[in-house]
Image (cartoon, rainbow, N blue to C red):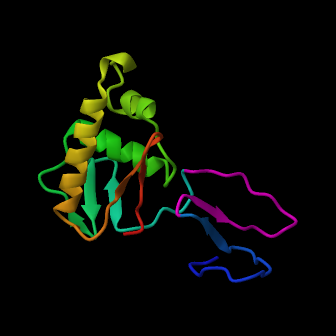
Amino acid sequence: VNGEQLQGQRDLEDGDEIVLGKVVRITFTESESTAPYNPENAPFDGKLRLERESRRVFVDEREVNPPLSLPQYRLLELLFDARGAICTRDQVVRAVWPDAISEGVSEQAIDALVRRLRDRIRELDSSHEYIVTARGHGFRLDNEG
């Protein structure tokens, strides 16, 4: 709760942030109210930042240069928009190669793209693995670096 590991029980207060296993992030809103979940407005702060209009990517306020290729950027944008949730390989294919038939994109092509994107991010921050493989499920972005 609020960046601290919970020991025992405690009452939640309006605005408390609850993180479950680095995958699920919930903001508590007073117990008598409900707030619709809108992933566009959910906080996803971290060292990695996107400027969508210009397709620029920053890690710890340093720009990835030269810019990412279009497939690399599309993959990163998909993972970023998922806000830590796992993206399946099918989701990757649809986001990165929207005109391809999913059976036409090999596992090796997806793995090679992920590897190249990891390498590009690692050029600016080798202390943290931003793109995490969830074996048998897909990939997720860990932007807490």
Left or right placement of residue 37 versus residue 71 in this view: right
Q: Main secondary structure of the magenta part?
A: loop
Q: Position of residue 64 (x, y in %)?
A: 19, 57
- Residue at image coords 42%, 68%: 144
What are the residue bounds of the magenta stretch?
22-39
Residue 137, position in %: x, y?
48, 40
Q: Is residue 101 visible?
A: no
Place of residue 27 in the rendered image (x, y in percent of width and height, measured from the top left): 66, 66
Is residue 75 shown to the viewer in this render?
Answer: yes
On the rendered structure, is 24 left or right of 125? Answer: right
Q: How many marks?
A: 0
Residue at position x 36%, y 69% in the image: 145
- Residue 36 shown in magenta: yes
Q: Is residue 24 left or right of residue 115?
A: right
Determine whether, in the image, residue 28 is placed left or right of residue 39: right
Residue at the extreme left: 66
Q: Residue at x 28, y 38 (%)?
A: 111
Name the spot of residue 55 as percent of width and height, x first: 27, 47
